[in-house]
Image (spheres, rainbow, N blue to C red):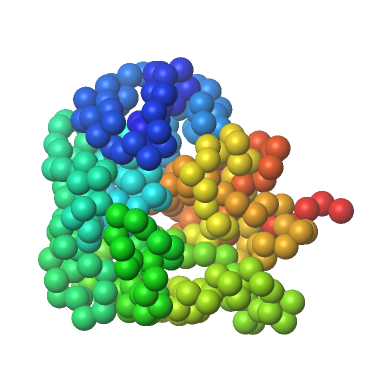
Amino acid sequence: LAFRAIGNSWTAPQVSRRQTLAGAGAAGVTAALEKPAFAERLDEYGRAVLPDGRLSKTESLQICDQVSCFLDKPKVFVAGSTGELGRRAVLDMLRTGMSIYCGVRDEGRMYEVQYKNRSSSKYEMTVIQDAFIEGGREQALQEQLCDASVVVDVAGARFGLDILRLGSGLDNTEPERCDLQGTKALVDAAKAKGVKKFIYVSAVLVNAKSLGEEVSQSDVYKNWNNFGDVLDKKLEAEEYIKQSGLDYTILRPVPMTNDFPKDVGGLYFAKPDSLLLQDGDVGKKVSRDDVGLAIVDAIFNPKASRGTFELTGVPNAPPTPREEWWEPKSGKKAT
């Protein structure tokens, strides 16, 4: 994943989308943060940004009189930071000038994305190794959260063969161990540590069994949930978060892609249980870049508080204007 820029502040490098944070290096983050913001509505990847070019209105969350902060922004622990979505969210947080604790459970992937401890006057990255999001690790996770006041959970069981990690992605017990018990352990650790905000990335169709046979018996639901009842586990994790007493934001993206937002379609916020991956839906896939940006904004935007939002890209449509973010709509095409 190459460094991205806002507006014309600098040009996107012509590199593979799998290139990681180190592709531009620490100097790239510092350079981006030092350059003046531009007033373009969209960045060059088609994402909606603020009128002044920032990724989020960071002054909206005023908790630094209660917790440890960096540049007047809360410190964030990211579980699943080396995944395709996690690394995008981390990069946007660094570009926003934040202090991030990157939870890493796979040392090989840590080297693959070339994460390492970095610190400057503009941002901080601290790598937390052996951050396994599994049941029974509540005490260890409390320590690994350090002084973070926001937890972002993008960790989850990964389905599919990885030739670099033979055996991974094929274990049907992973959704129970990671998506459910691991999320519960992370929530318990966050509560015990006094964390102020918990952001969880779930998925659409988690509530399919309550939406009638047309949904629960659909091939798309059955094929997806066939991997260790992963959607059922995510729904149970969602309910645990809601009952925790923590402030939370739950994001339910449709199937995600590494394509740029401008090639997928404008980001759209839908009500819970409205995107069913059917023909009448406004969209059926979303760019991970858009979901990563939504994660960052959810940290600061009070409109995202204690809400569940489904996300999709709408083909050939502009992204939702930033002032309308977190105002979910029906998710259905106009008739």
**Residue 290 seen anywhere in this rendered image of the structure:** no
> How many numbered markers are drawn?
0
Locate residue 219 relative to residue 172 in the image: left or right. right
**Residue 33 seen anywhere in this rendered image of the structure:** yes
Residue 279: where, in percent of width, then height?
Answer: 76, 59
Residue 153 position by quadrant = bottom left
Residue 320 position by quadrant = top right
Which residue lies most toward the right here? 335
Residue 204: where, in percent of width, then height?
Answer: 57, 65
Quadrant of the image for the N terminus? top left
Q: Is residue 18 above or below residue 138?
A: above
Residue 273: where, in percent of width, then height?
Answer: 63, 69
Residue 269: where, in percent of width, then height?
Answer: 60, 53
Q: Name the foreground residue: 194 vs 296.
A: 296
Residue at 82% of width from left, 51% of height from top?
Answer: 334
Q: Name the foreground residue: 45 vs 77.
A: 45
Residue at 53% of width from left, 23% of height from top?
Answer: 40
Residue at 18% of width from left, 55% of height from top?
Answer: 107
Locate residue 319 relative to residue 82 in the image: left or right. right
Locate residue 81 relative to residue 157 in the image: left or right. left
Q: Name the foreground residue: 17 vs 55.
A: 17
Locate residue 178 relative to residue 294 in the image: left or right. left
Residue at 66% of width from left, 72% of height from top?
Answer: 219
